Image (spheres, grey):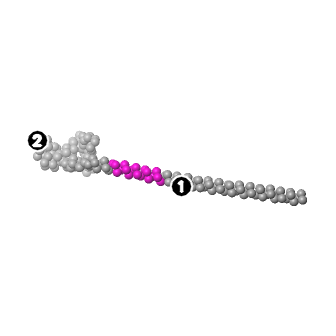
Amino acid sequence: MRTFLCAACAVLSVIAHVSADEGAVKSELSDAAKEVLAKVQSLREQGKKEIAKIENKEERDLVETMAIEAEVKDLKAERPKRDTPTDLFSLLKPKAAEPKPDKAREASLRARRVRRNKQRRAAAAARRNAKLRRVRRNRAAARQARARLIRRLQRAKINQSNKKAAEAKLADQLKKE
């Protein structure tokens, strides 16, 4: 029960501390809200006193840690999921209006990106085609060289067989004589 009270006080103390630091916001509060703020501040002070009463330093640190974790859990549960700010102090600062990029500029940037991608794809295709042309040309040259070699070997074989046939014919004629 005591830790729960301390945790609740710590949560309220941080919320009150953040809201109390904003002087401009405090001046705009209604009387009822100011009363609630005063109660929250008194609870915060009471929570600090209760935590200070814990003699064991480890237990005191543990209670403070649990209080902070409970506070963070509550804050995460309360804020919307879509825009979750990373820190609480950014919530207090008014956000500057970011200039939206001009639609024409956005369109030109997109067109440039599309054009670059198209050129990149065309260059890659040209490199691929050039490589394929070189491979085809080299294969064709190799086929032609092989065909020339085969024809030369066939001619040499035919010439050799013709030469042997002529020599055999000449030898037969010489035998007959």
Q: Are marks 2 and 1 in contact (CB under 8 Å)?
A: no
Can you say which quadrant of the picture contains the N terminus? top left
Taking depth in this image into account, of 29 and 64 the one nearest to the observer is 29
Circle 2 sits in a helix, a strand or a loop, which is it?
loop
Which quadrant of the view contains residue 83?
top left
Q: Residues within 10 Å of mark 2 (few under 14, many from 20)?
A: few
Q: Which residues are magenta?
A: 110-127
Taking depth in this image into account, of 69 and 60 the one nearest to the observer is 69
Measuring 86% from the left and 58% from the top, which residue is drawn there?
Answer: 173
Measuring 34% from the left and 51% from the top, which residue is drawn there?
Answer: 112
The residue wearing badge 1 is 134
Main SS, magenta region, reads helix
Label placed on residue 120: none
The residue wearing badge 2 is 30
Whole-Å distance between the Cαs marked 2 and 1? 84 Å
Q: Residue 165 at x, y = what percent?
A: 80, 56
Apparent side of residue 38 relative to residue 156 in the rendered image (left or right): left
Q: Amino acid at mark 2?
A: Ser
Say above or below: 1 vs 104.
above
Q: Residue 13 at x, y = what percent?
A: 19, 46
